[in-house]
Image (cartoon, rainbow, N blue to C red):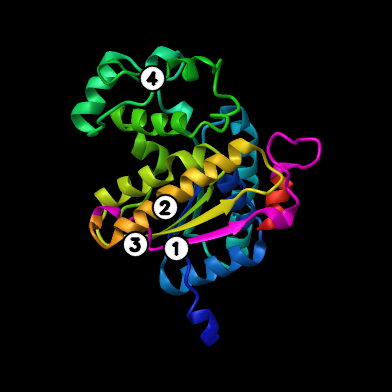
Amino acid sequence: MSEGFKKFDFPEVVLGLGGAGKNLVFSMLEKEWLVRTLLKESERSGKRYSFVVVDTAYGELPNDEKRMKTISKKISEISKELGIYSEPISLKVKCITKYINVSKAEQFYGRSLLEELHANEHIKAWWIYDKDMGIDNREIIKRYSDFSKGTLRVRGVTKAMFYKALVESSIDDIFEIPPGSPNIAMIVGLGGSTGSGMFIDLAKYIHDRNTGIKIDLFGILPSIKEGNDEKINTYIALTELEYLRLRKGLDEEYNLFNSVILTTIDPTGYAGASDATKADFASELKDFS
């Protein structure tokens, strides 16, 4: 075994959040050289690798699950070829809307939910609807007939889903992070709404329940050709990251990411999720990875 291979380091957990994160994780695991490298490293060191993709678009779930099965089958075939039968690489696909009650708009702002959020999740103001604080954004939720296409670039709705999952005690069922995993890579498209809307809250949740854990964030910046919604979401996400950086040395609570790596999707020529006639999201992201 070469010295270079001995130094190979890969996080035990990889989280792909939202459409961009999901497709990049799929694309990684479709690279046979990476699968072989991880399997050999697992045989050498005993490490196990968990890949979890999480999205809000339940209309994409059948295709996501089909892709997951194809990838898992290929990993199993390579494992058997190498004489490895312990299944050290796992891939799971999760859709948040399958785990929380969102069949009616009212389920985002019922009194019992508000009371639980204020009491146990330390939410000072619920941004969907909080009568006592004079906040009323219920019309945003009422726009959704369903979530088959996800949260449609509205970060606040994904954030609301995340906290609703906390209240309903389904958050661990969604993310399934193996206990004792010291290193996590989080892959997020900053211009979307699913990953961009929850990545900081998720990082805080993980840190609150694990000691000595390191989270490396890989943020994908949108193409210059994408729309204003993507650009605004990215600007807000970067502003939040900058705030964390400024507070990092003052309060351990803000020390969420071991490192932040930003890169642009521009080299793929991807023109935005709404430009379906010019670019296939999955294939463009596959080229990017």
Question: x%, y% of residue 257?
Answer: 38, 58
Q: Identify the disc placed on residue 11.
A: 1
Check contact, mark 3 vs mark 4: CB within 8 A: no
What is the CA distance from the residue labelled 2 to the residue labelled 1? 22 Å
Q: Is residue 120 left or right of residue 60?
A: left
Say which amino acid is labelled 3: Pro
Q: Is residue 251 above or below residue 160?
A: below
Tag 4 or tag 3, which sits nearer the N-term? 4
Of helix, strand and loop, which one carries label 3? loop
Say whether marks 2 and 3 touch (CB < 8 Å): no
Q: CA distance from mark 1 to mark 3?
A: 8 Å
Who comes first in sequence, dot 4 or dot 2? 4
Residue 118 visible in rendering: yes
**Label 2 close to label 1 by CB (< 8 Å):** no
Disc 3: CA contacts within 10 A as few (<14), some (14-19) or many (>=20): some
Q: Quadrant of residue 109?
A: top left
Residue 108, labelled with which disc?
Answer: 4
* Span colored in magenta: 253-281
Residue contact between numbered discs 1 and 3, judged by CB atoms under 8 Å: no
